[in-house]
Amino acid sequence: MAKPKLALYWASSCGGCEIAVVDIEIKILDVADFFDIVLWPCVMDFKYKDIEALPDGDITLCLFNGAIRTSENEYMAKLLRAKSKVMVAFGSCANDGCIPALANFFDKESIFEYVYKDSPSLEESSKGVYPVTKTQMPEGEIEIPEFWNTVKTLNQVIDVDYFIPGCPPQSLQIINAVSAVIDILANGKPLPPKGTFLGAGDKTCCDECPRERKEKKIKKFYRPQEIIPDPNECLLDQGILCLGPATRSGCEALCVKANMGCRGCYGPPVNVLDQGAKMISALSSVVDATNPEEAKKILETIADPLGTFYRFSMAASILRRVQPKSNNK
């Protein structure tokens, strides 16, 4: 019998999700043995035409990582959705937009102006030369993807069956998820309900954290290098910003156990629409201020609040983006 087909694809991402898959070490042999890997651009040389030639629904499982930033990202998301029985948003970029979606605080024009006109790394002769989607060359026409004004999550573009959160997903969670899929396919077991977050919990990171929280009032926020925290006390109680109250459980609080505040990469907990707003709400109860001016002064000790509260979830938030100057996506 033919093996089930597996596709792994990256859109707008850093490649960390690919490394996380490789990090499952010897278990990757189980994956290669059970599946026929038909697409994995990071590791193997496949062409888009290979996927286009497959019948619809021929791919059993697609692990799609990366946000949707360009027309090429959108095309591949829709193509792989048509060709795949099960589509999984793999990692924070596909789930919530992650770091690429911080670009949504700007627009395409201002990004291009900085990169191609104002960047100090450019040679003077190159400044003001902007990319175009089509360029005629002696060898023929070159076409590059259209750069969108707005970064989107995968499920804002296509229908997604399951989600695996994390930046990147933890190797153990990947092993558990892949092993579960292999068990389901090999033994004819039913799939979990559509929309399930695989390798994640229904509570918050705080519920996994071993530290003791006393809900102390905060007079100042510290960056990690500014203070040596008590290893047994809640980091937030010590003034170190930790997004544990606004982040889904499942990572086993690894960052917190390493004396670093939770960054929020597992996304918002169940029934929370906006991770940043949830964290701001959590902070409002611990800021030690008696008037708005004092509260403002304390909050000003948070470095880059927008980038902190929406580092991983801007595209999936209620905000989505700042008001664009153009209607280009």
Image: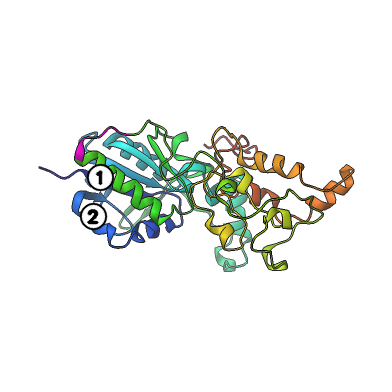
Provide the secondary structure element on which disc 2 rests: helix
Q: Is residue 285 left or right of residue 34?
A: right
- Residue at numbered disc 2: 30
Q: Nearer the viewer, residue 263 or 180?
A: 180
Asked if one can make out residue 288 in the rendered structure from this viewpoint, the answer is yes
Q: Is residue 279 left or right of residue 147?
A: right
Q: Nearer the viewer, residue 235 or 294?
A: 235
User: Looking at the image, do the residues carrying marks 1 and 2 touch, with CB atoms under 8 Å apart?
Assistant: yes
The image shows residue 185 at horizontal and vertical percentages of: 23, 39
Could you tell me which residue is drawn at 59 percent across and 35 percent down? 272
Q: Is residue 27 left or right of residue 274?
A: left
Is 13 rendered above or below residue 269? Answer: below
Name the amino acid, label 2: Asp
* Residue bounds of the magenta highlight: 187-191
Q: Nearer the viewer, residue 37 or 55?
A: 37
Magenta residue check for 194: no
Could you tell me which residue is drawn at 72 percent across and 54 percent down? 237
The image shows residue 71 at horizontal and vertical percentages of: 43, 42
The image shows residue 40 at horizontal and vertical percentages of: 30, 53
Q: Report crowding for label 1: few under 14, some 14 to 19, many 20 or more residues within 10 A (C-alpha).
A: some
- Residue at numbered disc 1: 182
Q: Quadrant of the N terminus?
A: top left
Provide the secondary structure element on which disc 1 rests: helix
Name the amino acid, label 1: Ile
Q: Report crowding for label 2: few under 14, some 14 to 19, many 20 or more residues within 10 A (C-alpha).
A: few
Magenta residue check for 190: yes
Asked if one can make out residue 310 in the rendered structure from this viewpoint, the answer is no
Of the numbered discs 1 and 2, the one sitting upstream in the chain is 2
Q: CA distance from mark 1 to mark 2?
A: 9 Å
Is 302 rendered above or below residue 188? Answer: below
